[in-house]
Image (cartoon, rainbow, N blue to C red):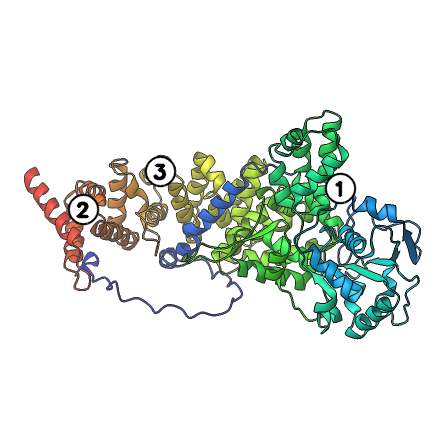
Amino acid sequence: MSEDEQAEPAPNETEPPPQEVGPEPPKEDPAPSSREEAVKGLRGEASELSNGRFTKIISAAADRLAGAGNLNLFHGDIIVDGDFVAGPGGRSGARRSSRARTEPQDVLKATEYFVAPPDFTDGVGRLQSTSLLVMADAAGTGRFTRALATLRDVLGEDANVYRVTSSMLGNPNWRVPHPRSGYVVVDNAGGDGKFAAGKLTDDWLVKTSERLLAEESYLVVVTGPVTGSLASASKRMEFVVEEFELPDPIEIVRRRMAGELPWLSPSELEEHLSTDGLAELLEDRDDPRFATRVASAVAEAVRTRDDVGKVVGRLSNPEDQVREWLSSSPDTADVALVLATAVLEDAGYLHVADAAIALYRQLSTSSATLTLRYLRRILAKRGWLELVTPPAGDSGVPRLRFKSAHLRVAVLGVTWFELDGARAKILEWLKSLAEHNDVEVRARTAQAAGILATNDFEHGLHKYLLPWAASKTAVLRQSAAHGLNVAGTIGGNAEAAWTHIEQWAAFESPTRSPKLPITAGLAVGGRLGFDAPRRALFVLRTLVHRDSWDLLEPVAISTKSLLQAGRTTEVLKALLEWADRSDDEEATVRILMAFSFAVLPEDGTGNRPLLMREKHEHRDVLPELWGRALADSSARKLARTALRSWVRYADQDETASSAVLDVLVGIADRGSADLERVLRLLRRWAQDPYAPSDKAAEFHDTLVDLEKEAS
């Protein structure tokens, strides 16, 4: 029995599915491949690396980024407390006295435009009954104004309100200075990122409440999210309001504008409020402090007859939003979550949360037990993140993303540029994601790495893209190749990227960075190659003629990627020309094997085979290359497997029959040996005891009839 007649394994004779195991460290590549090992690799690792899902994820993310634009970053006056310091540091100013009196008229002025959120009356009721209220939520949620408005409603409009320092929090000896008064404490995070309110205990809460009640006075503590002993206090529900609802931002703007511009008619006010982009801007930020800022800016524009639309456009700058966030001293957990979302945007929530926790462990200087609850944070904070849940009945998973596509680029760019002290740790974390065992994580990380490199292309190249490109692990090289594509296409660095790719492809040293040609081959199978296919094919031709079977894999992968991108005519023409002009037997084999791999359908997708879509195109070159591959002893097995897949697809889809028959007829027309080879294959597939193919039998009979007619 000839090689063509050897029995193929039954379709159901497959290996059992692998058991679920935890992530393993990426394995280093073996020694340089022989021809046999290279052929075997095309059905193993290469098939995995060429997974169309990787390219689809990159493309979908690129579509979302379309229009986000390039970042022009510059040093700003950013101060980040806690583990990070970037920009000019230190705050100056006189120390605030322990008690600062706020006159009744000042309280009224501060709350003049206050918009009560839906749960405002709940806080008022709690303060009336206990005399002590702790407002715990993130900065920018209108906590201070809400505290003053709560005291105003409880005490009346003529009451005095004193602002006291956070040193009294947890102090068992604190006494009420003045009876029948209101007090407010603004508890900012300290240098360690912790809030003084985190020290409060049940005992302090109860005793302070009793003292306030005795003096007919009221105290409101404004602090960050609940932590420390306060989080475990049994009396917490009596005294603490957390994750409270926010007022409608458009109502904040409406009320302030109506107050500052009393001469506006209701219709004129509504006309300004309907300015394009205003409602979307307020919804994206959903921040009372920002809504107040917008209201003042829009009111000033109306007052000075400026273009309100331009004002809204300036306020929509995502880079400013990120800088404002960093300046608010976010804690390490929030930095980790936001950065993880920026790197893995639109990935499943669990992937993002796991990555955020890993980054938190890298960045945090705290030895405290890790008790992060990111999902709770996301649902509680009405900020720039959103959890997108699949529709009922859908098998998808919840995915995490920014409300605005522009924010991903801004977060990556600004934080990478500003957080100097954390960059090395972030890069170490990024590398671990770039070699993750899940293609979704790798693909999104590769794109994020490319976006980061747009800040400073040469820095990004030499800091991480080049080391990744020279790595001994295949998945890290793949991430480097696609990261380079992103940096070149969205960052305006295409020519610089091409220069490096072409240099890597020509790299000759067997000891210094021997993997760079492999990465060069993978890189031309991305957007850079899609936009300049002739240049990409020149790189692939260079690699085909290198004396290394290690290069078969990247050549085959990128050949398939270029075909998937619609560069069919250029690719097939180039492959045939290379095969015709080559006097190097091994180079010719690599060309035919790359073709065979390219026409092989992706495993498990059920999609129509790639070139089968080109129903009546390439009817000469496609059968010619396929016939040569079937006639070659090294390429034959892969070419035969691909052809069998095409015939099997025709069994499922009658509309594919014409395209498959065109290829079979074209191969048979090459000569009698080719005809006999195809007929033997069709007979075997038609008589397969496990899964006989009706179409194979039909195609066999058609070829026999055509041969009879021709003779």
Residue under the image location 71 percent in, 43 percent down: 290
Q: Residues within 10 Å of mark 2 (few under 14, many from 20)?
A: many
Query: What secondary structure is found at the residue carrying circle 1?
Result: loop
Label ID, residue 662? none
Residue drawn where x is 87% and y is 53% of the image: 159
Residue 582 in view of the camera: yes
> Circle 3 is placed at which residue position?
568
Q: CA distance from mark 1 to mark 2?
A: 68 Å
**Residue type at numbered disc 3:** Thr
Mark 1: amino acid: His
What is the CA distance from the residue labelled 3 to the residue labelled 1? Answer: 46 Å
Task: Give the percent coordinates (x, y) of residue 329.
Answer: 75, 53
Horizontal side, residue 30 vs residue 39: left or right: right
Q: Is residue 351 above or below residue 700?
A: below
Q: Secondary structure at mark 3?
A: helix
Kind of residue sitting beneath label 2: Asp
Q: Which residue is mark 2?
A: 674
Instruction: Using the numbered discs, state the Cα–Cα distance from disc 3 to disc 2 in whole angstroms.
Output: 24 Å
| Residue 467 appears in the rendering | no
Whole-percent x, y for residue 491 in the image: 59, 38
Q: Nearer the viewer, mark 3 or mark 1?
A: 1
Give the residue drawn at x 73%, y 33%. Answer: 299
- Label placed on residue 75: 1
